[in-house]
Image: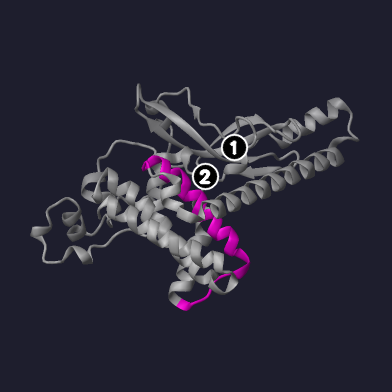
Amino acid sequence: MHAEQLKISSRKWMAAALTAFAEGPESYDFAVHHAGIAAEHILKAFLAGLHPALIVEARDFDSLLHATGHGTHTSIPASRAKTIGLMEAHARVHKILRNQIPINKQALEPVANARNGVAHSGVHEVAEVQTVFTTCLRLIDPLLAELKIAPEDYWGSYVSLHDKLIEERVQADRIRLEGKLAKARATFKQRYDHLAPNEREIVLATITQHSPRYMEEDLETDCPACGSQGWLMGDTHIDETNNPVVIFTPYVFACSACDLQVENEELWQLEDLGEEVEISDSPEKFYGAWEPDPEFVPEDPATDANREPDEDFYRGR
């Protein structure tokens, strides 16, 4: 549960992963497996650096005792303490670093699937190897900065391979985004060019007035492809750095007029669409209008029974 030990472990697993990747397709199973472990350990290193309790299973009291320095009160050795997995470690770090981490839950799932597939049954999706591997690199890079680890120390002699893979991924993302924008513009032209200006205005006002709303919160914004009203969707959190304020973090943009949809790091390439936004309402007013989430399960029912409303307890206004 020591941060320094987890940093060292992550670096060792990544060195083995890079070696396997460089050896070619016959070693790709090792590459995705080892890279997944490296990613999990560096996520845990960040959390353990804040406090060791942040990497243990919240419902396992013996593990919490070890993490908080009270292991003498349990008969279970520290080696048997239960810690969280890759997905939960990512979820906890993502909640803290939010905009620094370019990989969301959906993007990380193939990494977890590939690592688990190799570990448990010796199989993985060969077609996804480079995407899975590069996802690990992109997840780890901002964590190196947070942990003050020099990139050359972590990537070692494979710095150039890392840089090449990241550059190829950025170029592929940009090409995919430009393709989405071009298709959206063509769709808009095909749908509305034959309408008179006043007719088009009425039709667009009707089509774009409602958000797809499949995430926690949404904000209106102009579409970068067609200029119609589109919707940024994401989640919110409370920033208490100065006066408590509600911050909206966008993850997806969707436009009903031209069918454009971009998400995660694609947003960051579209000027200010990916930037966090401060909500004008106070936290009390903003969350006070929410309804309790019927699927919310408190980690500690006794403690959470009378907890104050916050963005975890309430979902879906």
Is 125 rendered above or below residue 235?
Answer: below
Q: Amino acid at mark 1?
A: Trp
Corner quadrant of residue 41:
bottom left
Using the image, tell me which numbered label, if any, was put on residue 151: none
Residue ranking furthest to the front: 157
* Residue 22 appears in the rendering: yes
Query: Magenta includes 125?
Result: yes
**Real-space CA distance between mark 1 and mark 2, rounded to the nearest whole angstrom:** 9 Å
Which residue: 75% across, 46% down? Answer: 179
Does 77 sit left or right of 93 as displayed? left
Mark 2: amino acid: Pro
The residue beneath circle 2 is 102
In-front residue for pair 100/185: 100
Instruction: Kindly identify the residue that appears in the image at 62 percent across and 50 percent down.
Output: 169
- Position in image of residue 120 (x %, y %): 43, 75
Q: Kindly indicate the quadrant of the structure image that contains residue 36.
A: bottom left
Q: Is residue 154 above or below residue 206?
A: below
Evaluate if marks 1 and 2 touch, with contact meaning CB atoms under 8 Å apart: yes
Residue displayed at 59% across by 53% down: 165
Residue 209 appears in the picture as rendered: no
Q: Quadrant of residue 12?
A: bottom left
Q: Nearer the viewer, residue 113 or 19?
A: 19
Q: Mark 2: few, some, or many residues within 10 Å (few <14, many ≥20)?
A: some
Q: Is residue 40 left or right of residue 20?
A: left
Residue sitting nearer the eye, 192 or 271: 271
Residue 268's tag is 1
Tell me if residue 12 is in the magenta stretch. no
Q: Which residues are magenta?
A: 121-148
Q: In the image, residue 276 lies at what x, y percent?
A: 51, 31
Disc 2, SS: loop
- Above or below, comparing residue 129 to residue 274 in the picture: below
